[in-house]
């Protein structure tokens, strides 16, 4: 084991981390490479200037400090990096934007913060370019989302063949952002069951997802549950 001589005296620079990183994200990360890559990206982005802060796949692959910390798992560091990034994207820590220009693919990563989400949405709408050298007319942009199987395993449990078939059907039936939000609602309400997630999706499909479209406010929505067919399950 390589020793650490300790932090030096005098002025030491710090990299800030959100409190939610320690209370929500850190307990959920179960892969050392994913943790190393996540922390390293926080560090890199803190050093960047301007409002648009992201890190590219090429930048990470050329980072000797990062790759040096990913050795020793029986894999090439670049392979380990790729897997760690996939896990971080699937978990929702990072947002990935992929640009395909001919046979060349470039990936950029944003932290999943309010600023990161707004930047990705502007890129999606063509209002923001990451690299001016790449013509928007020649580039196909994709924003990665965790697939339904990853969402299930992260929030509910291990897949079974029967559940996997239901998930495939749901992925074909409902928009990806609906599925993500339904899982999030189930977790927030401590109802980590696929049947609960599915019921949310079915209700949205039947009645409309947005309250603005249904014309119901929060009180009407609450009354629908406590006085309707779900009343026996609701504590007043």
Image (spheres, rainbow, N blue to C red):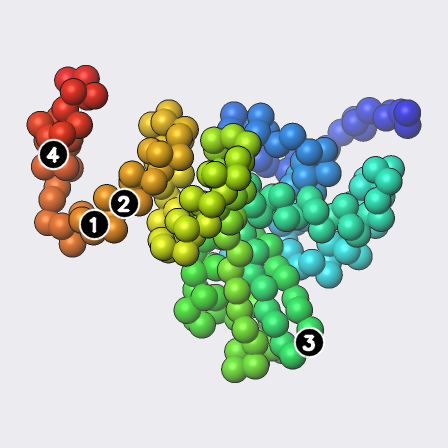
How many labels were placed on the picture?
4
Secondary structure, mark 2, is helix
Using the image, determine if residue 187 lies above or below residue 104: above
**In the picture, residue 195 is in which quadrant?**
top left
Secondary structure, mark 3, is loop
Rendering coords of residue 148 (x, y %) = 48, 46
Q: Which mark is residue 54?
A: none
| Foreground: disc 1 or disc 3 | 1
Read off the residue under disc 3: 103
CA separation, marks 1 and 4? 15 Å
| Foreground: disc 1 or disc 4 | 1
Rendering coords of residue 84 (x, y %) = 69, 44
- Which circle's residue, 3 or 4, is located before the other in the chain? 3
Read off the residue under disc 4: 224
Is there CB contact under 8 Å for labels 3 and 4?
Answer: no
CA separation, marks 1 and 3? 42 Å
The quadrant of the picture occupied by the C terminus is top left
Which residue is at the far front? Answer: 162
**In the picture, residue 36 is in which quadrant?**
top right
Read off the residue under disc 1: 206
Rendering coords of residue 85 (x, y %) = 66, 48
- Dot 4, how many residues are within 10 Å of its Cα: few (below 14), some (14-19), or many (20+)? some
């Amino acid at each position: 084991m390589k020793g650490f001589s300790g932090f030096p005296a005098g002025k030491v620079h710090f990299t800030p981390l959100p409190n939610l990183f320690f209370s929500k994200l850190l307990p959920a990360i179960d892969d050392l490479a994913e943790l190393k890559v996540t922390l390293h990206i926080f560090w890199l982005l803190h050093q960047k200037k301007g409002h648009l802060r992201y890190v590219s796949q090429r930048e990470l692959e050329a980072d000797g400090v990062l790759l040096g910390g990913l050795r020793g798992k029986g894999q090439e560091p670049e392979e380990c990096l790729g897997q760690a990034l996939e896990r971080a994207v699937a978990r929702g820590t990072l947002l990935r934007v992929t640009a395909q220009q001919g046979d060349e693919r470039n990936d950029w990563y944003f932290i999943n913060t309010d600023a990161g989400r707004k930047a990705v949405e502007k890129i999606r709408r063509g209002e923001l370019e990451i690299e001016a050298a790449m013509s928007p007319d020649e580039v196909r942009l994709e924003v990665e989302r965790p697939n339904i199987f990853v969402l299930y395993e992260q929030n509910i449990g291990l897949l079974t063949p029967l559940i996997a078939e239901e998930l495939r059907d749901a992925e074909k039936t409902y928009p990806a952002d609906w599925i993500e939000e339904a899982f999030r609602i189930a977790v927030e309400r401590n109802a980590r069951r696929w049947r609960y997630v599915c019921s949310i999706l079915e209700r949205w499909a039947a009645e409309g997802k947005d309250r603005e479209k249904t014309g119901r406010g929060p009180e009407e929505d609450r009354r629908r549950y406590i006085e309707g067919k779900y009343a026996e399950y609701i504590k007043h």
